[in-house]
Structure formats: C-alpha cells, structure tokens
Amino acid sequence: MDKRLEREKRLINLMVKRFCDDKHNQNALCLDCSDLLEYAHNRLLACPFAEDKPVCSKCTIHCYNTNYRKQIIEVMRYSGPKMLFKNPIDTFLYFWDKYKHRNLQIK
Ligand SMILES: [Zn+2]
C-alpha cells in the first residue's frame, strides 16, 4: 500500500477509535464504528487519485455516501482536534499532505 494512504488509514483508525471510546463506551470498536471504518478503508483503496490523492476532507470527488459521510464528519470534528495532542506526528503528516496536495485537480 502507498505510504500516504497508509498514513491516512492510520489516522482514520485513531480518530474512529477515539470517537467510539468516548461516545459509545465499548471495550472494542462498536458495530457501527467498525462498519464505518471498514467503509472508510474501502473508499481509500478505491480512490482514483491513488498516490496523488489530496486528503479526503479536501478531495474534489466526494465518494462517501450521505450516511457514512455524516458519520465520518462527526468523527473528524470530534477527534480531529484531540489527535493533535495525542498523535502529533500523524497529525502533522496529515496537514503536510493536505498542504502539498492543496491545488490538485482532476486531470
Ligand atoms: Zn462506536
């Protein structure tokens, strides 16, 4: 798997886990959240931009269906700011990718 996708996948894992821990109070990821995570992984793998992919929040294609999109936005809104303190390196790399690919358009 491409390094960037690997990074984004890792960050999504962390964010969903954090969200579920705090909001749903389960020992492991609850059904809804593991479903969302699996969906997110599949979207990443299916992404037509592959290596040149902008980060998902900046993407010009919105490939999530409405339901999952609502969920992932909620997760990011909740966990995003917390990631900065818990996982500064991952978060930094995320913003670096975001910056580097900011002007990417569909070819
Ligand atoms: Zn959950």
Image (cartoon, rainbow, N blue to C red):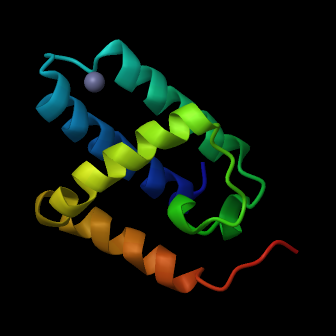
Quarter of the view holding residue 17: top left
Quarter of the view holding residue 27: top left
The percent coordinates of residue 88 (x first, y second) are 19, 68
Is residue 48 in sight in this rendering?
yes
Residue sitting at 56 percent across and 69 percent down?
A: 58
Total numbered badges shown on the rendered structure: 0
User: Which is nearer the eye, 55 or 51?
Assistant: 55
The correct choice, above or below, for 26 with respect to 45 in the image is above
Quarter of the view holding residue 7: bottom left
User: Which is nearer the eye, 64 or 55?
Assistant: 64
The correct choice, above or below, for 39 with respect to 92 in the image is above
The percent coordinates of residue 42 (x first, y second) are 62, 34
The percent coordinates of residue 69 (x first, y second) are 53, 42
Residue sitting at 20 percent across and 40 percent down?
A: 18
Residue sitting at 36 percent across and 25 percent down?
A: 33
The correct choice, above or below, for 18 with respect to 94 in the image is above
Q: Is residue 61 shown left or right of residue 43?
A: right
Q: Is residue 67 shown left or right of residue 86?
A: right
Picture quarter with the C terminus: bottom right
Q: Quadrant of ligand 1?
A: top left
Is residue 10 in sight in this rendering?
no
The correct choice, above or below, for 24 with respect to 73 in the image is above
Q: Is residue 3 shown left or right of residue 42?
A: left
The percent coordinates of residue 34 (x first, y second) are 39, 22
